[in-house]
Image: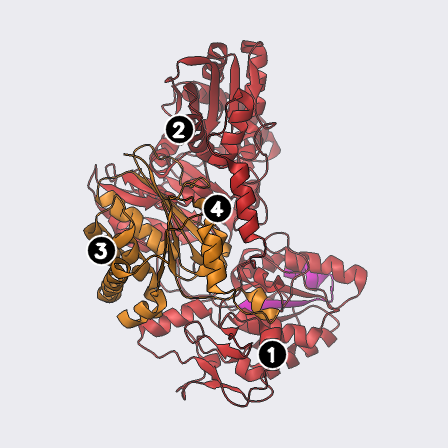
Amino acid sequence: MPDPHILLKDEPGKRVLLLGNEAIARGMLESDIGVVTTYPGTPASEIGDTISAIAQEAGVYMEYSVNEIVAVEVAGGAAACGVRALAAMKHVGLNVASDALMTLAYTGVRGGLVIVAADDPECYSSQNEQDSRLYTLLSNLPCLEPSNPQEAKEMVAYAVEISEKLELPVILRTTTRVSHTRAPVTFGKLSKSRLKGEFVRDVKRFVMVPAHARPRHDVLLERMEKAKEITENSPYNTIKPKGKDKEYGIISSSSAYNYAVEAAELLGLDIDFLNLGMTHPLPEKLIGKFLKEHSKAIVVEELEPYLELHVKAIAKDCAPSTEVYGKQYFPRSGELSTRLVLKGLAAITGRKLPINFEDLDRRYSEVSERLPPRPPILCAGCPHRASFYVIKRAAGEKAIYPTDIGCYALGIAPPLKVGDILVCMGAGIGTAQGISKVTGADTIAIIGDSTFFHAGIQRLLNAVYNKHKIVVAVLDNLTTAMTGHQPHPGTGMTGMQASTEPIAIEKVAEGCGVKLVRVVNPFNVREAEKAIKEALQFPETSLIVFRAPCALLLVREKRRKGLEIVPFKINEKCTNCMACIKLLGCPAIILKEDKTVAINEDICVGCGLCANICAYNAIVPQKQARRQWQNERI
Amino acid sequence: MREFNIVLAGVGGQGILLAAEVLGTAAVKDGLNVRVGEIHGMAQRGGAVICTVRIGGNVLSPLVLDGQADMLLGFEPVETLRNVKYASEKTLIIIGDEKIPPPELTLKGKGYPKMEEILEKLRQFSKKIVIVEALRLAKEAGSPVMQNAVLLGALAAVGKMPIKKESLVEALEELVPEKYAKMNVKAFELGYKYAENVKEA
């Protein structure tokens, strides 16, 4: 990763390769934003991480909020005081934040407020692939959609400008292919961020009791009327008239625009494009003009037919004879690609595909037919593997395991196979209560430390108060691991990289009224197993914290300190019983060509779990380590 | 300039994202337009990972179209084969030889596929294949984690890329932690020399 300090260089015109998310961070520094909040989530994480690394020097306040609604509220509070603010989250984070957002649309803001929502078409690292643009209709807030990192940077400043003009929050919607594409980005001028605000009391505007809320809804509608002028003249809503052929015209936005341009070129289609960067409200007049000029309009967009619905409505009024093509030619699920757009465009225009995909697919399926899949798995040395092993050992196959969002969702893979229902952040503890109530089965809700702070506490309160007999297993690896090791309230570190008092999960649980709370080290198999059995016998809600640091962090820390990592090896006592392989599924334990078990010393980090469970004492450290892995702390 | 497409494929943890970023950064140093496509998050944890690098004036999307890779840089043999649909007869395939068995094989008690079988299948797409002893060379340079630098060196030697070798070395030095910069450059040079002298497989 480039040193984020490069973003602090006030060198307008400098051209740097940046990830879309890093470009958004630079955009903040060019638009006077003083407060940045986030809860990490792919594909949005690097927005906050980049700012966090330079917040002190940049004079920006940055925090990893406990969850997305808090992030929006903190940013919204600052913006109510005239300070420019930005809250970044993944698409499903917007669901969590939506309650605040819907009504912030009524109160509006004084300083610019930008809400970044990063969508994940194809669910690369998400539980769904919802299209955040529909939130702009629900909230009636303006929406911008960049199609590349350069635009992503510029649109932060543009969002702030619109936000202050309309006194409304603005949604900046990206996708994986914008947030996680690296491209050259040209720097603009750095601004000096302002952190000091003033709260000017205005009860009728900011206190949304019914009597105040009713007129504020009308204010929102008036403001969005003004937004229509902005969108008609927006530099990001442009007709790119390069085509000679006026029969077809393509309307597109975001990453889909890139595929559409490349696909049209490959098909030799010399046609006009209407690229939409401001997609709420849509420029109805501009779209109408485009529809009048073309007899066939093709809407190319990822996920839902958001543009298409509007374009069809506009066509009915402005250009009833223009045919509109959309989702019947391009998939509504999954990520688009140049190939998918090529296929759709070829079908609509009757052009011949320039590449024989069918032949390619046939040949590829022949060679890849028996290729073993390689899904993501828990890392070698991951403490979750130890937790799952011991949980399964104590509670068995019959127990039900609601699980949650985080690395530990990978526990569903064989041989561990822990995880029976996964919905959203915190839902493991929630669904466990209904499951336990109606089945009477042993129910163990799996949740990570960061997720516990994000969404677990209220669910835990519900369980305790309503006397749900569930065991909550908090897999505490002392970090937000999946998204890149961000801090959370249990870590003792803030987004400003300052230390603070960590909050202990076990104390939170006790405070919530949980009467049986245990803290165990998952690598201490016997102790952990005892705690689980005790909890399963307990008639009410119980909670066990399985605490051991993320292996990636521990290894990194050891390397930094120059400490030795001692891998394990198999000795002559091995009977090749395969228990280590069949019970743990650790990527460091492999089969040699002669089908005997071996440890890949390049992957093994020496956690010792396999040695712990080997009945023959056949797995030993390559040499005597000074300290046992399981007793180490970061 | 015609577009130049590189597909990097391997297993999460092999340093594929970093290698792609080095390529992209070097391209910017050389004043070129570039797009690097990455996948982060859950997909990275020991799973199959793919990154794409596209260089050229008109390039907009980071994704490489099937059959259109100029280079397929495989960090692992099975993963190279998994992504061979990006290759055609003009594609140069470079393979790092570290075999990481997919967990399913180990669980079922099956061994890693035979290298000759993998090569045979790859040859159905392209006969231009170079195998690099990336693990051995990375260890020689100081650490097995530097296979990415070895493979970048090999790519620079035989890839006929529009990027200068010096720009790649500079980008590599900038992007790795300072104290590992020298070792990475050594790994790069080892990969470069190896690929210059090795025959196609």
- Please name which of the two marks, 4 or 1, marks the residue nearer to the observer: 4
- Mark 2 → mark 1, Cα distance in angstroms: 63 Å
In the picture, residue A344 is in which quadrant? top right
- Mark 4 → mark 2, Cα distance in angstroms: 45 Å
Q: Secondary structure at mark 2?
A: helix
Residue of label 4: B85
Chain of the residue displaying label 3: B
Q: Looking at the figure, which quarter contains the N terminus of chain A?
A: bottom left
- Mark 3 → mark 4, Cα distance in angstroms: 30 Å
The answer to whether dots 2 and 3 both sit on one chain is no
Q: Colour of chain B?
A: orange
- Residue A27 lies left or right of residue A295; in this view the side is left
The answer to whether dots 3 and 1 both sit on one chain is no
- Please name which of the two marks, 2 or 1, marks the residue nearer to the observer: 1
Q: Which mark is residue A578?
A: 1
Q: Secondary structure at mark 3?
A: helix
Confirm or deny contact between disc 4 and disc 1 (CB under 8 A). no
> Which amino acid lies under the numbered mark 2 shown in the image of this protein?
Ile
Based on the picture, tell me whether residue A472 belongs to the magenta stretch.
yes
Q: Secondary structure at mark 1?
A: loop
Residue of label 3: B169
> Which amino acid lies under the numbered mark 3 shown in the image of this protein?
Val
Chain of the residue displaying label 1: A
Across and down, in percent, residue B67 comes to: 44, 41
Q: Which contiguous range is marked in magenta?
A: A460-476
Confirm or deny contact between disc 3 and disc 1 (CB under 8 A). no
Q: Is residue A400 visible?
A: yes
